[in-house]
Structure formats: structure tokens, C-alpha cells
């Protein structure tokens, strides 16, 4: 048991937790508020905390037809396309990574193959690969072979981020599963493929869902790959940067864009907090 | 060696066996026999990643050429890209900026992360309710974080200056002034990644056996002494492994810096990765840009190697 605390120290600790939580959440709350303000309200000093909320900024983001006519003047944004791009690229990356990565993770967890640890080291090393150095030659190669600005090319190149992660995570989840059932099935004469399909995969399902959430998040985060290798198929992170137009600072519209990109991860926290903690800390948190 | 309840450490250890090739496992000849199922299963992942490895070497090769966008003939120029680089003031400025950014961010994050983890490990009512909040900055896209702080740090009407004025501090230029830009970027990095340290250290604290703490208390160790001599050595490996991961990523940090200052004002925040991007894709000197990235990569390698050495030293001393 932990030592019993006095009432005062309990209060102080609660207060400190509240302050930390406030520091961690305040920027988000502020951005949400800003996204509901009008341009004039954002530009006032001191900043206002009480105002009549408007959804105008979100309309500007998505309403392509009328985007020219805003109360702030002319601003043309097409935010729906980048969001669609990001979703397509992220989902595609998750599917390809699962197909290629989970079998590899299983082999690294359960089978004895030559150079196993070297292969695992090689794969994890990509988690820390200098992405820009990999992408620089790709820029000219993609333009030569026609993969520049295509979903196919983007999903392939996103594997440099997502594939090592899924191999790593599925290996760690498989190592957590009890080995006896598989061994019993093998003694009964089951083929390795049957063992994986009928025994390992069902047990692995929760772990795989968690790992998929995490790599979807990693793909959603990515900025540099889209910046260099795409233009019309650019992900939402690249589109965000374009909202920050030097000279004309449409902060509220950008805030609305930020809120849109942040909603997805916040929903993912609600769905799978434990899995995200485990993935984001490379397995230190179980 | 036998600290019960430290199953989280097992994971850390297996993660580190990746960083350092583990001792060859003892296998009989029979077990070593080629297993076609396994090879077929692992092949797709390996092939995809070998493609990236090839690109990496191709990038290193490009750093040895005078490749520019639109130039038809490319010459092999040996190390002359590097030779030109090390003669420029800008290059050393970038190396310094990279280390200042990564070093100070990781150091501050480790300290704050430790404090935050200790705070949440007290398990007071709010700490139990607010656990998920720690995760929040980590799940946001770094680019969104960068732009969020750009709006908040606006020198004219940003909320940060308002909060400072409430505390009686005058206006601050944040990322718009060369003398404060770096501090502001480190602040953004600290806000975003302190939770990473906090989560890992929190796992370490939970792995410490209650009996160890109890024994310390029975032997008369006071709060601070028990923390300094019992807990800190036990969680030191966790802090260091978190520092290794963070150091690698902050030496490579691109999104947060590109999203806020793009290396400016002046050269004040032009870390190597940002300078490499500008050199390659805005000045279209791909060879020079690749050379900058190779330098960045070597720095990451050296720093990681040093940290892993330190990690092993600490771990061997503790366990």
C-alpha cells in the first residue's frame, strides 16, 4: 500500500495534476475557440474568450462553390480533396503494411530463420531512417517512371514509415501470446499456414486493431513525403501549411483546418488509448 | 537481475536487442534448416524495405555528384560537395542549430517528463481521471502542432503574449525574432514530446516492486532519499531509452521547424534537415542537399551510438 497522505498534500497534488492537464489541453481548446470566431474577433486585443460562435470558417474550408465569397474577402480553399487524399493514403498504407508486415512479424517472433536478429535490427532501423535522404532520389525517379503524384506511389513510399512499425508491433504482440496452443496444433499435424489462420490470427485480432490504429495515425501525421512527392494528391498536412498564407493571415480558417486534422487522432485516443500508448512508447507501456 | 514485476523492462530489453545485435542463439543444425514457409512470409516486407535501402545508398551516391535539377549531364565529383560545405559559415551554423535544438529539447523533456510521471504515479483522484490527457500532444500531427503554436505565438495578437501580459511580462517576439526563435521552437517540442518521456517513465515507476520501496522506508529512507537512491537508479534505463528515441527524432526534426519558421528568421533555426530541403528543392542543388542529409544522418548515428553506450553502462550498473 502507498503511504496515506495528508489532506493538504492530496489537494496540492490534485492541483498540480490539474495545472499539467490545463497546459496540455489549453492550446487545443484555444484553437477550437479560434476556429469558431470571425476574423475580426481573432484580431482584437486583448483576445476574447466570450463570443458568438460561427461555423463560417468550416464552410469556407469545404464549400468549394462559394469559397470565393467570404466575409473576409477572397480566399479559395479546397480542403475536402486533401482530406480524402490523406484518408486514402493512410488506409492504403495500413492495408499494405498489414499484408506484408504481419507475416514478417510472425516469423520474427516464432520461427527460427538464419540471421533473425540481424533482420529484425535492419527492419527497426528504418524507424529512424533519414526520410529526406530516401525521398530525394525518389523525386526524380518517381517523375521518370510516372509515380509522382499518384496514390500508388504515395502508399508505397509511406511503407518506409508504417511497415517497420507494424512488423515491430505484431512481433511484440505475437510474443505475448501463449506458445503451447500452436505447438499442440503442430504436433497434431496442422500446417504452419493453418496454425496461423485458425489459431494465431483470432488471438491476435485485438492487437492488430490497435496496431492498425497506430500506423493509421503515423500515416496521418506524415508531412515530408507528401510535400516532396505529390501535388494534387497532397495529404492534409501539406494543405494545412498552404492555409498559412503569408501576408493575409486567415487564422480562423486555418484554425478550422487544424481542428479537422486533430479530430481524427482525438477519436483514435478514445477508441484505443492503451494500444496507442503501447505503440507510441515502442512497447514500454503494456 | 531478479526484479519481479518488471515485465515492461523485458520489452525494453527486446527493443534494445534490436539496437545492439544479440548474442548468437544456440541452434542445432536441424532447427537451422531452411524453412520455406517462413522465408515466403518474410520476403514481401524485406523486398519493400530493401527498395528503400537501395534509395538510401542512391541518395548517398547523389551527394557525391553535382546533380542539379534540369542539368542533363551529372558528374561524379567525389567529396567536393562536403568540402565546399565545411568551408561555409552557414553549414556550421546549421550543425550548431541541430544540436542546440535536439540537445536542449531532450534534456528539458526528460526533466519535465520525470516530474509529470511522478505526479501521475501518485494516483490522486485527478491523476487517475486525466491519464488520457498525457497522450494528447503525441497523437496530433506535428505539422498541426507547429501551425497551432504559430497562431498562438503571433507577436501582434497571439494568446501567448496575452498570457504573458497577465503575468506582467511585456510583449515577446517568439518565432519572429532571431534571438527568441530557437527558444520558441524548443518550447513547442517540449510541449509536444514531454508526454513521451512521461509515459515511458510512468511505466518504469509502475514496474518498481512495492517491496523495494517498503524496504527503503523501513530502513528509514526519507522521501527524497528514497527517490534519489532507490527509484531514480531503477528508472534511469527507462529515461535513457526514451532519450535515445527522442534524440534520434529531434535531430531529424523537420515538420515542426518547417511548419513554424522554415529555418528563419535569418539562419537562426536552419537545422540540417530544413537546410537540406531548401538546398535541394528550392535552390534545386540536389547533390548539395543530399550531402547535408548525409551529414545529418552521420550525426544521428554518432549521437545514438553514444547514448546506447551510456544506456548499457547504466543498465549494467543497476541490474
Image (spheres, coloured by chain):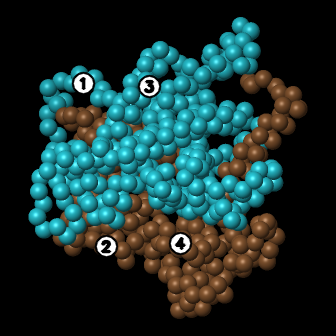
Where is mark 3, residue-wise?
A: B311
> Which numbered disc flags the more N-terminal residue, 1 or 3?
1
Q: Residue at x 67, y 50 (%)?
A: A24
> Judging from the image, what secondary structure is the residue with disc 4 in?
loop
Q: Chain of mark 1?
A: B
Q: Would residue B52 be found to the left or right of residue A83 on screen?
A: left
Q: Residue at x 53, y 74 (%)?
A: A245
Residue B98 visible to the viewer: no
Q: Position of residue A1 (x, y in %)?
A: 74, 24
Where is mark 2, residue-wise?
A: A149
Q: Would residue B267 be found to the left or right of residue A25 on screen?
A: left
Mark 4 touching mark 1, by CB under 8 A?
no
Letter of the cyan chain: B
Picture disc at residue A246: 4
State the separation of the CA atoms marked 3 and 2: 42 Å
Work out whether disc 1 and disc 3 sit on a shared chain. Answer: yes
State the separation of the CA atoms marked 4 and 2: 26 Å
Mark 4 touching mark 3, by CB under 8 A?
no
Q: Which numbered disc, 2 or 1, marks the residue closer to the eye?
A: 2
Q: Which of the pair B1/A217 is nearer the observer?
A: A217
Where is mark 1, residue-wise?
A: B24
- In the rendered image of this protein, which colour is used for chain A? brown
Amino acid at each position: 500500500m502507498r503511504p496515506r497522505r495528508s489532506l493538504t498534500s492530496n489537494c496540492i497534488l490534485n492541483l498540480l495534476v490539474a495545472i499539467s492537464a490545463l497546459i496540455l489541453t489549453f492550446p487545443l481548446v484555444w484553437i477550437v475557440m479560434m476556429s469558431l470566431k470571425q476574423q475580426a474577433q481573432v484580431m482584437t486585443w486583448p483576445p476574447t474568450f466570450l463570443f458568438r460562435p460561427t461555423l463560417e470558417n468550416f464552410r469556407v474550408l469545404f464549400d468549394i462553390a462559394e469559397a470565393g465569397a467570404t466575409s473576409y474577402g477572397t480566399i479559395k480553399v479546397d480542403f475536402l480533396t486533401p482530406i480524402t487524399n490523406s484518408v486514402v493514403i493512410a488506409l492504403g498504407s495500413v492495408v499494405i503494411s498489414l499484408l506484408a508486415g504481419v507475416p514478417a512479424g510472425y516469423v520474427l517472433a516464432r520461427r527460427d530463420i538464419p540471421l533473425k536478429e540481424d533482420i529484425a535490427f535492419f527492419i527497426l532501423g528504418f524507424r529512424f531512417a533519414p526520410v529526406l535522404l530516401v525521398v530525394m532520389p525518389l523525386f526524380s525517379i518517381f517523375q521518370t517512371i510516372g509515380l509522382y503524384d499518384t496514390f500508388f506511389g504515395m502508399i508505397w513510399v509511406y511503407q518506409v514509415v508504417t511497415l517497420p512499425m507494424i512488423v515491430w508491433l505484431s512481433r511484440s504482440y505475437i510474443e505475448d501470446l501463449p506458445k503451447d496452443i500452436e505447438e499442440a496444433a503442430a504436433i497434431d499435424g496442422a500446417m504452419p499456414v493453418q496454425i496461423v489462420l485458425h489459431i494465431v490470427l483470432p488471438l491476435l485480432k485485438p492487437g492488430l486493431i490497435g496496431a492498425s490504429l497506430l500506423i493509421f495515425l503515423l500515416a496521418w501525421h506524415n508531412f515530408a513525403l507528401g510535400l516532396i512527392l505529390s501535388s494534387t494528391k497532397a495529404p492534409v498536412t501539406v494543405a494545412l501549411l498552404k492555409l498559412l498564407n503569408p501576408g493575409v493571415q486567415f487564422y480562423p480558417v486555418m484554425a478550422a483546418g487544424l481542428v479537422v486534422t486533430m479530430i481524427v487522432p482525438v477519436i483514435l485516443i478514445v477508441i484505443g488509448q492503451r494500444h496507442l500508448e503501447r505503440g507510441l512508447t515502442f512497447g514500454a507501456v503494456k | 537481475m531478479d526484479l519481479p514485476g518488471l515485465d515492461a523492462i523485458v520489452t525494453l530489453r527486446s527493443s534494445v536487442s534490436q539496437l545492439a545485435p544479440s548474442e548468437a542463439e544456440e541452434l542445432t543444425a536441424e532447427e537451422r534448416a531452411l524453412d520455406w514457409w517462413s522465408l515466403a512470409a518474410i520476403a514481401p516486407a524485406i523486398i519493400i524495405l530493401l527498395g528503400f535501402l537501395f534509395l538510401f545508398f542512391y541518395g548517398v551516391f547523389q551527394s557525391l555528384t553535382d546533380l542539379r535539377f534540369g542539368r542533363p549531364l551529372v558528374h561524379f565529383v567525389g567529396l567536393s560537395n562536403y568540402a565546399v560545405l565545411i568551408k561555409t559559415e552557414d553549414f556550421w551554423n546549421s550543425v550548431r542549430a541541430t544540436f542546440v535544438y535536439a540537445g536542449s529539447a531532450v534534456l528539458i523533456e526528460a526533466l519535465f517528463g520525470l516530474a509529470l510521471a511522478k505526479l501521475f504515479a501518485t494516483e490522486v483522484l485527478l491523476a487517475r481521471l486525466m491519464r488520457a490527457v498525457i497522450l494528447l500532444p503525441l497523437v496530433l500531427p506535428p505539422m498541426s502542432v507547429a501551425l497551432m503554436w504559430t497562431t498562438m505565438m503571433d507577436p501582434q495578437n497571439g494568446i501567448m503574449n496575452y498570457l504573458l501580459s497577465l503575468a506582467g511580462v511585456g510583449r515577446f517576439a517568439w518565432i519572429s525574432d532571431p534571438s527568441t526563435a530557437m527558444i520558441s521552437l524548443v518550447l513547442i517540442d517540449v510541449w509536444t514530446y514531454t508526454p513521451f518521456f512521461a509515459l515511458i517513465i510512468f511505466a518504469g515507476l509502475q514496474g518498481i516492486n512495492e517491496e523495494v520501496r517498503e524496504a527503503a522506508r523501513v530502513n528509514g529512507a526519507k522521501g527524497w532519499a528514497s527517490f534519489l537512491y532507490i527509484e531514480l537508479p531503477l528508472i534511469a534505463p527507462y529515461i535513457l531509452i526514451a532519450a535515445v528515441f527522442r534524440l534520434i527524432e529531434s535531430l531529424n526534426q523537420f515538420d515542426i521547424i518547417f511548419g513554424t519558421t522554415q529555418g528563419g528568421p535569418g539562419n537562426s533555426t536552419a537545422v540540417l534537415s530544413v537546410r537540406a530541403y531548401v538546398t535541394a528543392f528550392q535552390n534545386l542543388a540536389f547533390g548539395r542537399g543530399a550531402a547535408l542529409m548525409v551529414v545529418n544522418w552521420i550525426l544521428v548515428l554518432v549521437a545514438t551510438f553514444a547514448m546506447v553506450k551510456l544506456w548499457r553502462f547504466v543498465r549494467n550498473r543497476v541490474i
